[in-house]
Amino acid sequence: MSRVALVTGAAKRIGAACVRGLHAAGINVVLHYHSADREASLLSDELNALRADSLFPIKANLLQMDQVQHLAVAAQDVWGGIDVLVNNASSFFPGSIGQVDERDWDSLVGSNLKAPFFLSQALAPSLSERRGCIVNIVDIHAETGLPHYPVYSITKAGLVAMTRCLAKEMAPNVRVNAVAPGAILWPAQDAGAEGQLEILKKVALQRCGSADDIAKAVKFLVEDADYITGQVITVDGGRTLFR
């Protein structure tokens, strides 16, 4: 029987690349999405055409705990359990000190940290039984913070801490690791061409990475890292060399 992966926030960008990479490895995928109905449908049709009944989309709002729990139950029901959890879903928006309100805090913490924890907890029995793994998508700014994005940075730092805590708590049956992207895909609110150029000047490889670069790291941790747990793989083209 094929292994089963649940990938959150998986209809577009890095999430979709992770889905394609895991699917190409013969893994069945439960694709979580929230509002990207069209993209989820297209990706589902694409991959199910390649291998029938190998991808199943589930819509859920990860800011609502009842939907997080429903997602965990429904994902396990599709093929009888979960072997791999990729916590990719994430919110990203600025909020300098003095401008952050409680709703901003709750939104970022809820999607970027609270939901991954409770989803991991809900799936722990299945992951343990199947000797599976968790991969969290964090951020290179978890360590030092991204200017004007303090709450976002705090949540990603928390997700790094969660990675290491769960690696201890869920050992020896479940491996828990993370991937930290650098300059991969420009967010909708980027600084434009000039801002992008300034960022790339600080990247050793002098170019932006791709979603596939992250997907390959995720696939490595799932497929070829049986003796790796509690670690963060940085995929940033060498940007952190220049801090």
Image: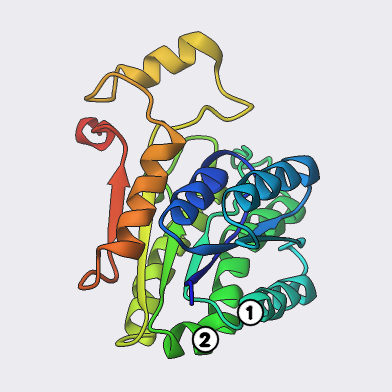
Residue 186 place in picture, x, y as percent: 52, 27
Q: Evaluate whether residue 81 shows in this view.
A: yes
Q: Specify the quadrant of the image occupied by residue 236.
A: top left
Mark 2 and mark 1 in contact? Answer it, CB < 8 Å. yes
Q: Specify the quadrant of the image occupied by residue 144.
A: top left
Q: Amino acid at mark 1?
A: Gln
Residue 120 place in picture, x, y as percent: 53, 76
Eyeballing the image, is 198 above or below 119? above
Residue 177 place in picture, x, y as percent: 35, 65
Q: Amino acid at mark 2?
A: Ser
Image point (47%, 35%), residue name: 147
| Residue 58 numbered mark, or none | none
Residue 85 place in picture, x, y as percent: 50, 68
Q: Specify the quadrant of the image occupied by residue 7.
A: bottom right
Q: Report the front residue among 89 and 104.
A: 89
16 relative position to 223: left or right: right
Q: Report the front residue among 122 and 92.
A: 122
Residue picked out by circle 1: 76
Q: How is the image coloured?
A: rainbow
Eyeballing the image, is 183 above or below 179? above
Image point (64%, 48%), residue name: 49
Give the tally of numbered discs: 2
Other-residue count near label 2 (Cα within 10 Å), few / some / many at <14 / 14–19 / ≥20: some
Task: Point out the image quarter for the C terminus.
Answer: top left
Q: Report the front residue among 87 and 100.
A: 87
Eyeballing the image, is 68 above or below 32? below
Residue picked out by circle 2: 126
Badge 2 marks a residue whose secondary structure is: helix
| Spatial CA span between label 2 and label 1 | 8 Å
Other-residue count near label 1 (Cα within 10 Å), few / some / many at <14 / 14–19 / ≥20: some
